[in-house]
Image (tube, rainbow, N blue to C red):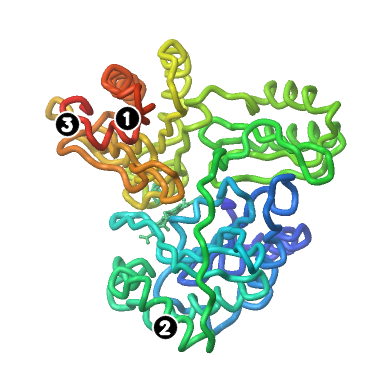
């Protein structure tokens, strides 16, 4: 969470109030371990394999603020999930733990390392080990120390853990972790099964305690203070005091009794937070963009919102076989993960009719390693393929229409599969 327009003299009071509600700023930024991203439904979902909250708490208490990890080569991102939908986008984190059931050792975690996007994107890889819940914090610490001790410090744009993993490979990485840092071998472990549901938690889902959680979609993740206040009132009026947010820019309302679910959904709708959104509204995310980000080249949220609203009508008529994801970035850093989207847009100035205007370079057919599709991997670019900022809806409609014309229905081909095999002309 970022707060803007702060006066420096107010900072101590802001810290006091944040801490009073359990929010901290320690290592929220800098070349340190960033927030440990946990499953949005940790401890809640009926179909959860394991609640990762104790592991998140242990890492946070033992290591966030630890001075020996406060000067890493670069940022270090962590994610943990116990949910079968694999809802933390673990493949783009430096270290990640994904719940898995081992045939003899019970439920624990599959360890992934070395993911990251930006200008040299790389999906994380499995080390092939099984980490028991009580060993997670030590394994995390081992990976963080490897990064500290062996990570590249000389060039800032080559400093993330992914570059070390690329040089070492998973075999050496595992060996160094086991021999130099843990002092014992980790058991081999299976991969977690491919998710059968998306990890955005949109819609109505059952909790362990018989109540429900409801995920809703603010368009491109944007909500105002007024909306949040109204949302808090709405949630309280439905007997709950808990909300969570997701890496897919959704909000999840927890603890709703079954007989209040429909009333909550109606109230959410009235706030523009749909629990049953169109596929394109659900699948579109956008980064902060030029409004609030000093690294941005172009605006994102406004253009993406306009595109979603236009496309809802146009795509509805096309009857898409699968959801299509549209991710919009204001610059190459890829906070909105363009390389892992069906259609990813990277903000840059583009020349149209001899004039430089805000626009985007197009990435197509990205996916995540956990998807059971042979397209899983990063998106492709097509030489010279760019769209102007106000041309997103037209482009998406055009490329999706081509996909529908050309897709192989017999194999239920997805957009990403098609995008990787399609002629460049079809993608323009
Ligand atoms: C507006 C202020 C922000 C700035 C200045 C910023 C800066 C950056 C930079 C420089 C990178 C590239 C890292 C690299 O080259 O290794 C990056 C990547 C990324 N950021 Fe941001 N970011 C901002 C906001 C956010 C927010 C709000 C989120 C999500 C909650 C986010 C999520 C990500 C993700 C998912 C990546 C790609 C994964 C990676 O390589 O780390 N960013 N960001
Ligand atoms: S992708 Fe670029 S413009 Fe968007 S929030 Fe990240 S750094 Fe800022």
The residues bearing labels 3 and 2 have C-alpha atoms spaced at a distance of 43 Å
Q: Identify the residue under disc 3.
A: 424
* Comparing labels 2 and 1, the label whose residue is closer to the camera: 2
* Comparing labels 1 and 3, the label whose residue is closer to the camera: 3
Residue in the picture at 73% in, 39% down? 253
How many residues crowd around disc 2 within 10 Å: few (fewer than 14), some, or many (20 or more)? some
Decide if residue 244 is on the left or right side of residue 347.
Answer: right
Q: Secondary structure at mark 1?
A: helix
The picture quadrant where one finds residue 352 is top left
Q: Identify the residue under disc 1.
A: 389
The residues bearing labels 2 and 1 have C-alpha atoms spaced at a distance of 47 Å
Residue in the picture at 17% in, 33% down? 351
Above or below 37: residue 377: above
Q: Identify the residue under disc 2.
A: 176
Rendered location of residue 191, percent (x, y)? 50, 58
Residue in the picture at 66% in, 64% down? 106
How many residues crowd around disc 3 within 10 Å: few (fewer than 14), some, or many (20 or more)? few
Name the residue at the left extreme: 354
Rendered location of residue 193, percent (x, y)? 53, 50
Q: Is residue 330 visible?
A: no
Above or below 243: residue 280: above
């Amino acid at each position: 969470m970022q707060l803007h327009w702060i006066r420096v003299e107010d900072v101590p009071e802001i810290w006091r109030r944040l801490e009073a509600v359990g929010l901290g700023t320690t290592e929220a930024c800098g070349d340190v371990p960033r927030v440990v991203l946990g499953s949005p439904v940790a401890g809640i979902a009926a179909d959860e394999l394991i609640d990762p909250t104790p592991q998140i708490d242990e890492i946070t208490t033992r290591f966030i603020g630890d001075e020996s990890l406060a000067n890493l080569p670069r940022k270090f991102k962590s994610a943990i999930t116990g949910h079968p939908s694999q809802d933390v986008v673990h493949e783009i984190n430096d270290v990640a733990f994904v719940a898995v059931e081992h045939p003899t050792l019970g439920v624990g975690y599959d360890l992934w390392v070395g993911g990251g996007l930006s200008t040299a994107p790389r999906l994380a890889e499995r080390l092939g080990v099984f980490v028991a819940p009580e060993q997670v914090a030590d394994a995390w610490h081992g990976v963080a120390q490897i990064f500290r001790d062996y990570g590249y410090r000389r060039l800032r744009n080559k400093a993330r853990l992914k570059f070390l993993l690329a040089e070492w490979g998973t075999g050496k990485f595992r060996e160094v972790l086991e021999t130099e840092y843990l002092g014992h071998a980790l058991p081999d472990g299976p991969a977690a099964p491919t998710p059968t549901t998306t990890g955005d938690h949109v819609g109505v889902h059952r909790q362990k305690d018989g109540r429900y959680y409801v995920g809703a979609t603010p368009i491109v993740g944007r909500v105002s203070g007024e909306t949040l206040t109204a949302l808090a009132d709405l949630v309280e009026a439905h007997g709950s005091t808990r909300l969570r947010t997701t890496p897919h820019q959704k909000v999840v309302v927890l603890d709703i009794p079954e007989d209040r679910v429909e009333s909550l959904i109606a109230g959410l709708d009235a706030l523009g937070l749909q629990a049953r959104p169109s596929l394109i509204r659900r699948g579109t995310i956008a980064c902060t963009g030029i409004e609030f980000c000093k690294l941005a080249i172009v605006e994102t949220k406004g253009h993406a919102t306009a595109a979603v609203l236009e496309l809802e009508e146009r795509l509805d008529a096309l009857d898409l076989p699968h959801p299509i994801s549209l991710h919009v970035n204001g610059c190459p850093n890829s906070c909105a993960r363009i390389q892992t989207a069906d259609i990813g847009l990277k903000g840059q100035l583009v020349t149209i009719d001899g004039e430089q205007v805000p626009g985007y370079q197009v990435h197509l057919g990205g996916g995540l390693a956990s998807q059971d599709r042979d397209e899983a991997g990063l998106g492709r670019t097509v030489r010279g393929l760019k769209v102007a900022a106000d041309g997103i809806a037209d482009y998406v409609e055009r490329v999706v229409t081509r996909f529908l014309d050309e897709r192989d229905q017999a194999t239920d081909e997805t957009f990403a599969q098609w995008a990787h095999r399609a002629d460049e002309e079809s993608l323009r």
